[in-house]
Image (cartoon, rainbow, N blue to C red):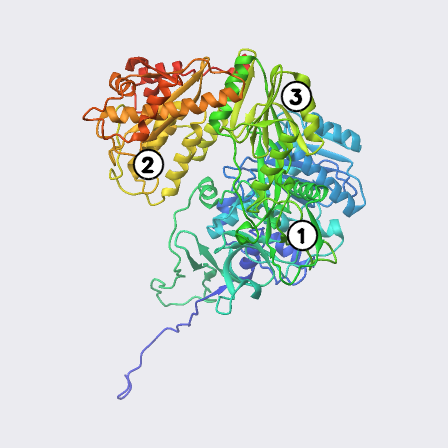
Amino acid sequence: MNGNSFYLKLDLVEGHVFSAKIDESVVWHKKYVHFNLKSLRFMQEAGMVEDMLEISVNAQTCESCELGKQHRQPFPQNMSKRATHKLELVHSDICGPMSTASLSNNVYFALFIDDFSRMTWVYFLKTKSQVLSVFKSFKKMVETQSGQNVKVLRTNNGGEYTSKEFNVFCQEAGIVHQLTASYSPQQNGVSKRKNRTVMEMARCMLFEKKLKLLWAEAVNTSVYLLNRVPTKSFQSKTPIEAWSGVKPSVKHLKVFGSFCYLHVSSVKRGKLDERAEKGVFVGYAAKSKGYRIYSLSRMKIVISRDVHFDENSYWNWDLKKVHKCDQATPFILEPAIESTIIEGPLDVEATSNTPVLKMRPLSDVYERCNLVHAEPTCYTEAARFLEWIEAMKAEIDVIERNGTWKLTKLLEAKNAIGVKWVFRTKFNSDGSIFRHKARFVVKGFAQVAGVDYGDTFAPVARHDTIRLLLALTGQMGWKVYHLDVKSAFLNGILLEEIYVQQPEGFEVIGHEHKVYKLHKALYGLKQAPRAWYSRIDSHLIQLGFRRSENEATLYLKQSDDGLQLVVSLYVDDMLVTRSNVKLLADFKMEMQDVFEMSDLGIMNYFLGIEIYQCSWGIFISQRKYAMDILKKFKLESCKEVATPLAQNEKISKNDGEKLEEPSTYRSVVGSLLYLTVTKPDLMFPASLLSRFMSSPNNVHMGVAKRVLKYVKGSVDDMKSTSSYVFTISSGVICWNSRKQEVVAQSTTEAEYISLVAAANQAIWLRKLLVDLGQEQSSPTELYCDNKSIISIAQNPVQYGRTKHINVKFHSIREAEKNSLVKLHYCSTDVQLADIMTKGLPKSRLEFLRLKLGMSMANLKEKC
């Protein structure tokens, strides 16, 4: 103390500043989908790309890289001799199958790597067998671009690369095909390492943005960017510069999975509509200067150049909202000199509004993010694949050869109807791909009734007719042959004046403003089925056929010697059987003179039905369809049950809670109904479940799943169920189980109504058999397990409890009087139709299945 003043001895305290900033190196690390920072820095310092900011390398750990790239330490490798020019050596390998199909239904991808430049190309495949077709496309493309020829192809020893067709192609092209030794993938190390790098980058993208998009988009983007980064084997240039001689710019690169807004063209929006739509960036367009964007509103990939990116945001798929990324990297500036101040805990940390999400396995991410499409949904998607391009060319070629249209100017008083491409993959009975079909269709919903079209109805063959035809053919020892009319609807003659737009991708250069005037029908037109049926009907009659009066799609050609040819028509499919081989050959020639047709030989697959024709019978099944159903509803590994329904099980519409997504239930029931084409034991369960399609609940869904488990190995309105089974020789040909349209007042009345339905079906079958040359000299025998209804049918007296029965149901009396049917009593124990009315115990069900001729034998081996 000095006077009135106090002196304090204090230590000097230095000030500290703490800050957080965005590290641009981290941003570029993410733009290059987690490529290592050392390589990025080398690329920037060497001037290998333009417009890249300075990259700093730090020891910060990237969690996504740790999750996506962690692997074992590499084994020592020997360096092999490098190629000295382009295409001297090409490496190739296939990766897959993935647990989930891509947007285009692919499960594999194939890489082709040029050893000299390390330029990489990727192709996506549905099956490994497609590798030959994509290699042909790749070879043609790279040889055209480089002016060099592929000299050596190095692959593994997989069957897709060692097939006879692949080896023949390599020999004819003068390509040396080098194969690795068995169990020695190290000999194909370039492609194996490239596969690993591509998949690591793809996983990082999915983890980084919690992105629920398909793996194919991530793989495609990985390959695009790998071609723009240096490799250890070629450090002075990027692969794309080594290949093309042009240094790439990276100014256009964006962070994968970023949230964005893409501009909506004025022609696609109204005055008050939004001018942009939300999307997620998923890659770079290969054939245009644009970005691949997943549209959140349209749920499809679109290509656009007018996009505004928010690289600091991503779309949260669980919460359906945009979230900001954690891009602030906190760090502390340590004091340069020591201080005597005692520091307390530092209360500074980076925070985020992003909720903590539990990391899912990659397989679960694939499963949840997948949008399953069996085929492309538009021309843009299809144009990426050679097989679909060829399919579209084939379709246009058929239309041109057929004289379907003529290019002309659109009259002022007329409107041109819109068109689109529809794509479908057709399969064989064993599940293998038969062909890729592209169909050019008209948007028929824009047609005006009475102006653009008149009658539209066209019949198709009933399943009962097809089964009856197969039964008679097997009984007579004949064979059934399958003919397919290519692009059948294009043969229909139009009576109306119709104009359509030009097909996308096939516009006539210099005449884009013109339209096509149709002379013949196109698929999608309202009247197309009618026009085709009228054309084929008149042609068959011209060839000497007679149309059945009882089945409009059954045609018969007879002579003095008896029945000769029978044709059953189902749209563009023809089932033909004959009594003489020469007659069949002549018929095929007569048809091929007028229509372009495919001769599929002896029928073995038709409308999802597998047909086995043997010397001792004809057998039908839907094994592939059944397996597809089980796979679709994820029950292919379920535990089997012995019966489709529990014994005496009854369900009603008020049993449980309503389903939030009834579409799945409806899809299950629809699939089961189609299975009844060959499985009469499913007729009652499917019919029962179909009564609750409008408002299904969880109990109904449980019963439906039980029926599906049976496939693998209702007291609502007091209406009864009618059922019947008809047999010829040793097999059933038609069956039915249907709820009656009226409320019966007694069991006797209900069974009487069911008997009348069976009699009506018998009368129709008799007429059809007469058309097929099978004279009906004796009545059809109907077996019933109720003596009371037989008495009512045979005795016209009106009893007190039967006088109220509708008069139309007494038609069976006249049928028996005219010797069309004959009623017999049988005990319930041998009543085959019992399987159609209720759930049965296992022993009873197996007994009736055996009596119906249903077998689990491997008929293909026996035949």
Q: Are marks 2 and 1 in contact (CB under 8 Å)?
A: no
Q: In this view, does 247 lie above or below 701?
A: below
For residue 163, say whether it is visible: no
Mark 2 vs mark 3, CA separation in Å: 45 Å
Tag on residue 584?
3
Rendered location of residue 98, percent (x, y): 53, 37
Looking at the image, the residue that sits furthest to the left is 800
Residue that mark 2 sits on? 691
Q: Distance between the residues labelled 3 and 1?
A: 37 Å
Contact? badges 3 and 1 (CB < 8 Å): no
Marks 2 and 1, the one that precedes in the sequence: 1
Q: Is mark 1 on a helix, strand or loop?
A: strand
Quarter location, residue 430 = top right
**Residue toward you, 556 or 571:** 556
Q: In this view, does 340 lie above or below 219?
A: below
User: What amino acid type is highlighted by mark number 2?
Assistant: Arg
Where disc 2 sits, the SS reads helix
In which quarter of the view is residue 79 placed? top right
Callout 3 amino acid: Leu
752 relative to 105, above or below: above
Residue under the point 48% across and 52% down: 209
Label 1 amino acid? Lys
| Quadrant placement of the C terminus | top right
| Mark 2 or 3, nearer chain start | 3
